[in-house]
Amino acid sequence: MDAVFVFSLLPMAFIFWVVATGLLKKVDVYTAFVKGARQGLGTALKVLPYMVAMMLAIALFRQGGILSLLERAIRPLLQAFGAPEETGPLFLVTPLSGSASLAMLSDIYARVGPDSFAGQVASVMVGSGETIFYTVAIYFAAVGVERTRHTIPVALAASAVAYVVSVWVCGWLL
């Protein structure tokens, strides 16, 4: 059998397994599904205002020129520990938007190549980064947490450490 064919059957096999397990345990599978879908819809409605606020904040950040100002501000810091200049915007955008960071990664590849030092550092950064603000807004909203306290500062510090380690590891290994 072709591997692609086998992997295309996995989702259907999983659904069959879930339904069969439910039936064996004498669970009304359809009612359980509808109840779960209703809860999921409620969660989506509860999270929607936070998602809209995050999307607006990201759009303002990108279109308002704040990104270029912050990029110029951190440039000396990047140079101090040997980070490629091309990765500065990626460092700033990754905590905000995964799709924007992937677009920037693609731009870095187009400008300097994926095998360049900047391309490799950018790849490791994207792989080890997290969309902090999006994650905090969505997951904390889903469970009803309103005060994030130290979550964002600690997550941003961890992101900065991951960035420094990305530069160090790529410099050491390559």
Image (cartoon, rainbow, N blue to C red):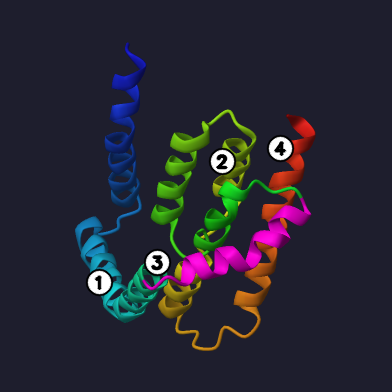
In this rendered view, identify the residue nearer to me: 72 or 87: 72
User: Which amino acid type is marked by label 4?
Assistant: Cys
User: Which amino acid type is marked by label 1?
Assistant: Leu
- Image quarter hosting the N terminus: top left
User: Which amino acid type is marked by label 3?
Assistant: Arg
Q: Residue at x 62, y 85 (%)?
A: 149
In this rendered view, identify the residue nearer to me: 113 or 41: 113
Magenta highlight range: 64-81
For the residues bearing labels 3 and 4, Cβ distance under 8 angstroms? no
Q: Residue at x 23, y 71 (%)?
A: 38
For the residues bearing labels 1 and 3, Cβ distance under 8 angstroms? no
Q: CA distance from mark 3 to mark 2?
A: 21 Å
How crowded pointer 3 is (Cα within 10 Å; few <14, some 14-19, many 20+) is rated as few
The residue to which callout 4 is attached is 170
Residue 75: percent from left, percent from top: 65, 60
Is residue 95 shown left or right of residue 160? left
Main structural element of the magenta stretch: helix, strand or loop?
Answer: helix
On whether residue 69 falls in the magenta region, the answer is: yes
Q: CA distance from mark 1 to mark 4?
A: 43 Å
The residue to which callout 3 is attached is 62
Q: CA distance from mark 2 to mark 4?
A: 10 Å
Give the foreground label among 1 and 2: 2
For the residues bearing labels 1 and 4, Cβ distance under 8 angstroms? no
User: Which amino acid type is marked by label 2?
Assistant: Ser
Up/down of 6 relative to 14, above or below: above
Residue 123, numbered label: 2
How crowded pointer 4 is (Cα within 10 Å; few <14, some 14-19, many 20+) is rated as some
- Image quarter hosting the C terminus: top right
Q: Disc 2 or 4, which lies upstream in sequence?
A: 2
Q: CA distance from mark 3 to mark 4?
A: 28 Å
Residue 55: percent from left, percent from top: 34, 71
